[in-house]
Image (tube, rainbow, N blue to C red):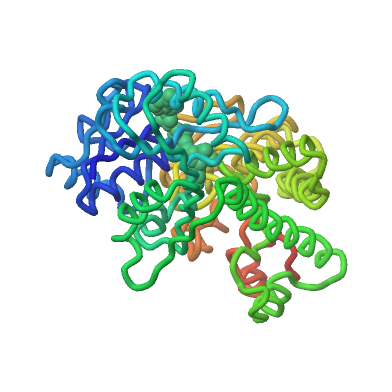
């Protein structure tokens, strides 16, 4: 099938590459000329495990094209997938300007029936706005579908190739049939496609992210309570996760959630709920807890070293908002760097892939985990990269002025560190 993907970011590029890998002819459009140039030069502008070989082989096979040509992109795909950004506006609502611009461009140039589907995370009612935008520009018939994307950065290819579910919000049987055909190769062992109303599909995506964010904030509060009550959140996590109604996933306490989705989606859902006259009080708490949790490591550091950190240097391991991505959007590391540098400290940060060009007063980004420790007072861990899980503790102890580790990801065994004579400050654990 001829498919156009509009927006070639984390979602659009993975979607385009995986659809091409299933044999489709995919045209990826982006307005960012530099990004398209990079892709046409065989470079991948983002870090996403497993993506590069898929892009390369499909480009070489001629099934995957990258372009800034809007007219050609509209002409190409019977299916037009909108995967542009929906960043937070100033009031917290999702900024719909890119989605609506993409819809208008399709309307302006389309000459035959098309399915226009949103992969972007969009508020309930967006399909109606897209329909209006298309009608303003065109008399050609079309169908608008909500097809929210659930992939996770860091495991995006795997998630796309083996989805837990594919949600299709549509009321046009011809559009549903077309999307069934598109997704059939990705659900061969059992059907995972769910057809529902457009509005339910739009809300499902927000509800999923809001639920996951809620679990994280809940565990962060339990962790903070465990600290004052002398309990250990890891033991509590195992205790509650064993209940199948709860499960083990997304129950890790830490330095707060970040990334390009949870923070903005929680705010956008809350904003639209308030506008609809049915505010989500739970989500207000989730958001407040998360804001506070992002300062937790900074507070622990000041409790140990004092409020004025002039003359101190901290080694920071991990900048990305989570492991296996280069995405820094809303990363807890940025809050921590700000807290430390405002208090007068310097930060030496290392991340295997993220933040290499990052510039901030008081911050130096270095190229290895050991370099970050050079002349540092203590080590702070913010991202759970694999290479931080079993480090050379003797080298850490030898390099740090104070043998202390502040661990926003609870990577180590408190007893082991105690035995090594390293002071350990995890989140919600008994030390
Ligand atoms: N990143 C994720 O993990 C993830 C997961 C699920 C859903 N989503 C949702 O998917 C959407 C895209 O997210 P992302 O992280 O891929 O964003 P991104 O910022 O990485 O990419 C968006 C791309 O769209 C391009 N663009 C903007 N307007 C355009 C237009 N009119 N025509 C063509 N290209 C245009 C931008 O140049 C950019 O390259 C968002 O709504 C997001 O909430 C993201």
| Residue nearest the observer in this picture, 115 or 37 | 115
Q: Residue at x 62, y 37 (%)?
A: 125
In the shown orientation, is residue 164 left or right of residue 45?
right
Q: Percent position (x, y) of residue 280?
A: 79, 48
- At 87% from the left and 69% from the top, the residue drawn is 229
Residue extending furthest toward the left: 61
In depth, the one of 94 and 218 nearer the eye is 94
Which quarter of the rendering shows the C terminus? bottom right
| Residue 419 percent coordinates (x, y) | 64, 74
Q: Give the residue displayed 73% in from the left and 32% down from the top.
A: 310
Name the quarter where the N terminus is drawn: top left
Above or below, comparing residue 386 to residue 365 in the picture? below
Residue 46 point in image, percent of width and height: 37, 39
Q: Left or right? Give the position of 348 relative to 408.
A: left
Question: Looking at the image, which is closer to me, 212 or 429?
Answer: 212
Total number of numbered discs in the rendering: 0
Residue at image location 50% in from the left, 47% down from the top: 171
Seen in the picture, residue 306 relative to 223 is either above or below; the reply is above
Q: Please provide percent x and percent y for residue 117.
A: 43, 40
């Amino acid at each position: 099938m001829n498919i156009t993907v509009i927006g070639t970011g984390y979602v659009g590029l993975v979607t385009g590459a995986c659809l091409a890998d299933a044999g489709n002819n995919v045209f990826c459009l982006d307005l960012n000329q530099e990004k398209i140039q990079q892709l046409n030069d065989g470079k991948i502008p983002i870090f996403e495990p497993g993506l590069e070989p898929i892009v390369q082989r499909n480009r070489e096979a001629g099934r995957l094209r990258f372009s800034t040509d809007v007219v050609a992109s509209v002409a190409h795909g019977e299916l037009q997938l909108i995967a542009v950004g929906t960043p937070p506006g100033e009031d917290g609502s999702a900024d719909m300007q890119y989605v609506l611009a993409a819809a208008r461009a399709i309307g302006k140039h389309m000459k035959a029936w098309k399915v226009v589907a949103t992969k972007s995370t969009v508020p309930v009612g967006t399909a109606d706005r897209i329909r209006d935008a298309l009608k303003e520009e065109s008399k050609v018939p079309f169908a608008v579908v909500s097809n929210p994307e659930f992939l996770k950065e860091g495991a995006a290819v795997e998630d796309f190739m083996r989805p837990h579910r594919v949600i299709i919000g549509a009321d046009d049987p011809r559009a549903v049939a077309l999307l069934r055909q598109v997704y059939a190769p990705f659900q061969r062992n059992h059907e995972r496609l769910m057809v529902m109303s457009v509005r339910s599909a739009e809300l499902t995506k927000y509800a999923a992210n809001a639920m996951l964010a809620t679990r994280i904030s809940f565990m962060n509060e339990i962790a903070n309570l465990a600290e004052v009550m002398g309990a250990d959140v890891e033991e509590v996590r195992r205790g509650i996760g064993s209940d199948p109604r709860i499960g083990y996933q997304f129950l890790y306490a830490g330095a707060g959630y970040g990334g390009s989705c949870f923070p903005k989606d929680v705010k956008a859902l809350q904003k639209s709920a308030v506008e609809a006259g049915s505010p989500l009080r739970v989500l207000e708490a989730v958001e407040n807890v998360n804001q506070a949790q992002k300062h937790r490591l900074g507070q622990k550091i000041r409790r140990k070293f004092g409020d004025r950190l002039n003359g101190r240097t901290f080694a920071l391991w991990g900048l990305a908002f989570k492991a296996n991505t280069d995405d820094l959007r809303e990363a807890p590391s940025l809050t921590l760097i700000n807290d430390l540098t405002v208090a007068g400290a310097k930060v030496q940060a290392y991340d295997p892939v993220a933040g290499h060009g990052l510039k901030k007063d008081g911050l130096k980004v270095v190229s290895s985990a050991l370099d970050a420790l050079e002349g540092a007072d203590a080590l702070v861990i913010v991202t759970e990269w694999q290479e931080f899980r079993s480090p050379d503790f003797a080298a850490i102890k030898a390099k740090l002025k104070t043998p202390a580790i502040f661990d926003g990801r609870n990577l180590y065994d408190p007893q082991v560190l105690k035995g090594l004579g390293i002071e350990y400050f995890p989140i919600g654990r008994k030390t």
